[in-house]
Image (cartoon, helix red, strand yellow):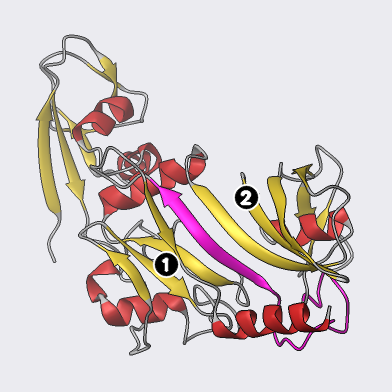
């Protein structure tokens, strides 16, 4: 695949920064991606390679951009069934099962959601200029539910902005041990790396980690458990699991941040990404996607109701 060449002229009525000018010309790319192209020598101004992103583009000046084809990620597409909730030319919404890792990493070279998606649509390789094609958010391995992936650069940039600006409404269902201090509430507890166990995250004091905010409400109360609905406003690693621990009601089956022995017959933690409300590219009203509880979690909930 050859490089894509684009030429633009500044006829906007004023001089402006090169990267800002290119954002308006190539809206499918993020400003950071365009700054990367400038740094890589892929942008010229009046035939001369651009020196920096802040270079001023005067009126009438011609800018040429050479966009290399997506860098092959080296990832292999695999024939793994996908539960597709929605798909169009821009993105795909998948209901991820528990036990599936989202992207390849140490110890998980295959069998991931990314491998499955590339097997379904090989053209998604390299989207976003990363080795994680199309990804804009993640779910833990044992968390089931909705995840959205971009199918082109423009959609990837759009979705990244939606998540970055906190315009995406995410709803999770969690069965917890005990109950929270109040039936509903808001948790503001920063999250950082656990200093004693580097593979774990932890609640840390403000200023030592990243801001993490969640809201929750009680859906159903049992003798020893509570079914909660969570709305994370930030997307930190293990956020809901840690916030449940912080509230004193860890998620059932979470043997990392909760009880070492599950209080129900479950082989995973009871956390499911149930609903996703998001504004899609070129649409004026947000869409809402839902994925009902998987059968194994429905069974756990039925048993909890029966015995409590």
The residue drawn where x is 24% and y is 29% is 24
Q: Single out the residue that lies furthest toward the top.
A: 13
The residue drawn where x is 36% and y is 30% is 53
Q: Residues within 10 Å of mark 2 (few under 14, many from 20)?
A: many
Q: Residues within 10 Å of mark 1 (few under 14, many from 20)?
A: some
The residue tagged 1 is 131
The residue tagged 2 is 231
Dividing the picture into quadrants, the one containing residue 200 is bottom right
Residue 70: x and y in percent read 27, 62
For discs 2 and 1, the disc positioned in front in the rendered view: 2
Is 180 magenta? The answer is no
Q: Secondary structure at mark 1?
A: loop
Residue 230: x and y in percent read 66, 54
Indicate whether 293 appears above or below 6.
Answer: below
Q: Nearer the viewer, residue 273 or 227?
A: 227
Q: Bounds of the magenta span?
A: 254-278
Indicate whether 194 appears above or below 53.
Answer: below
Main SS, magenta residues: loop
Is 259 magenta? The answer is yes
Q: Earlier in the sequence, mark 2 or mark 1?
A: 1
Residue 11: x and y in percent read 11, 17
Indicate whether 151 appears above or below 77.
Answer: above
Dividing the picture into quadrants, the one containing residue 262 is bottom right
């Amino acid at each position: 695949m050859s490089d894509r060449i684009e030429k633009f002229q500044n006829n906007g009525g004023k001089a402006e920064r090169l990267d800002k000018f290119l954002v308006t010309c190539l809206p499918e790319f993020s400003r950071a991606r365009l700054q990367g192209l400038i740094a890589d020598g892929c942008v010229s101004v009046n035939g001369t390679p651009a020196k920096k992103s802040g270079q001023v583009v005067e009126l009438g000046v011609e800018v040429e951009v050479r966009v290399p084809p997506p860098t092959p990620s080296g990832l292999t597409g695999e024939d793994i069934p996908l539960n597709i909730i929605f798909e169009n030319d821009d993105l795909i919404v998948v209901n991820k099962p528990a036990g599936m890792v989202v992207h390849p990493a140490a110890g998980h070279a295959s069998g991931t959601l990314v491998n499955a998606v590339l097997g379904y649509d090989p053209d998604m390789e390299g989207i976003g200029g990363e080795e994680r094609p199309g990804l804009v958010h993640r779910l833990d391995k044992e968390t089931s539910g909705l995840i959205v992936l971009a199918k082109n650069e423009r959609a990837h940039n759009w979705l990244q902005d939606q998540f970055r600006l906190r315009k995406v409404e995410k709803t999770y269902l969690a069965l917890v041990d005990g109950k929270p201090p109040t039936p509903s509430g808001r948790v503001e507890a920063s999250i950082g790396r656990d200093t004693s166990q580097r593979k774990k995250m932890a609640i840390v004091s403000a200023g030592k980690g990243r801001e993490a905010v969640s809201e929750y409400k009680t859906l159903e109360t049992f003798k020893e458990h509570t079914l909660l609905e969570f709305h994370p406003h930030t997307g930190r690693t293990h956020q809901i699991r840690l916030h449940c621990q912080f509230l004193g009601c860890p998620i059932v089956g979470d043997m990392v941040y909760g009880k070492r022995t599950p209080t129900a017959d479950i082989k995973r933690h009871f956390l499911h990404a149930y609903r996703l409300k998001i504004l899609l590219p070129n649409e004026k009203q947000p869409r809402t996607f839902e994925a009902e509880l998987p059968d194994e979690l429905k069974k756990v909930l039925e048993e909890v109701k029966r015995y409590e």
